Image (spheres, helix red, strand yellow):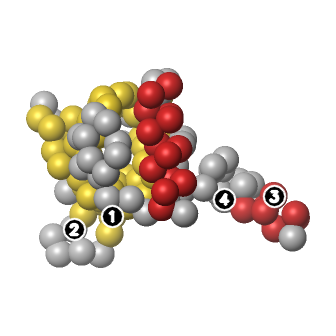
Amino acid sequence: MAGESEFMNSESNKRISPRSMVEIAVFVYVMEEWVACKTIDLSLEAISVELAYPLIPGSLVALDIHQSQGMKKHEMLTEILRCDALETEPVTHRVVMKFVDPSQDFMVDTKSLIQNKS
């Protein structure tokens, strides 16, 4: 079994911590405005959201998490890791964003939120 978990964190999946399905209010700053997203999942390193706009992997965007479900309001910089078109009507995009230098308060809130969902 140890070999399997090492494989899961290999080239195909570089996550260190587990991710959880959460429902938190998230906005991304795109085209000079804050755009609401649907949160897909959250980990200590990254967040995955559904967004109407495609974002360019490698670019940096601001992320605003509004206070909800035990999560305080946090605004931070993220790096786009991946953006995939989803087969929805109209087309939306699943965007995976890595947190850039998250605050200690954010990390505590996120860890608590993830543990409560487990």
Q: Residue at x 35, y 42 (%)?
A: 71
Tag 2: amino acid:
Val
Q: Nearer the viewer, mark 3 or mark 2?
A: 3
First in residue order: circle 3 vs circle 2: 3
Crowdedness near tag 3: few (<14), some (14–19) or many (≥20) residues, C-alpha within 10 Å: few
Q: Which mark is residue 43?
A: none
Crowdedness near tag 1: few (<14), some (14–19) or many (≥20) residues, C-alpha within 10 Å: some
Q: Which mark is residue 91?
A: 2
Cα distance between the residues tagged 1 and 2: 7 Å
First in residue order: circle 2 vs circle 4: 4
Look at mark 1 in the image and give the residue it sits on. 85
**Residue 79 visible to an observer of this rendering:** no
Q: Secondary structure at mark 4?
A: loop
Tag 1: amino acid:
Ala
First in residue order: circle 1 vs circle 2: 1
Rendered view: 93 above or below 103: below
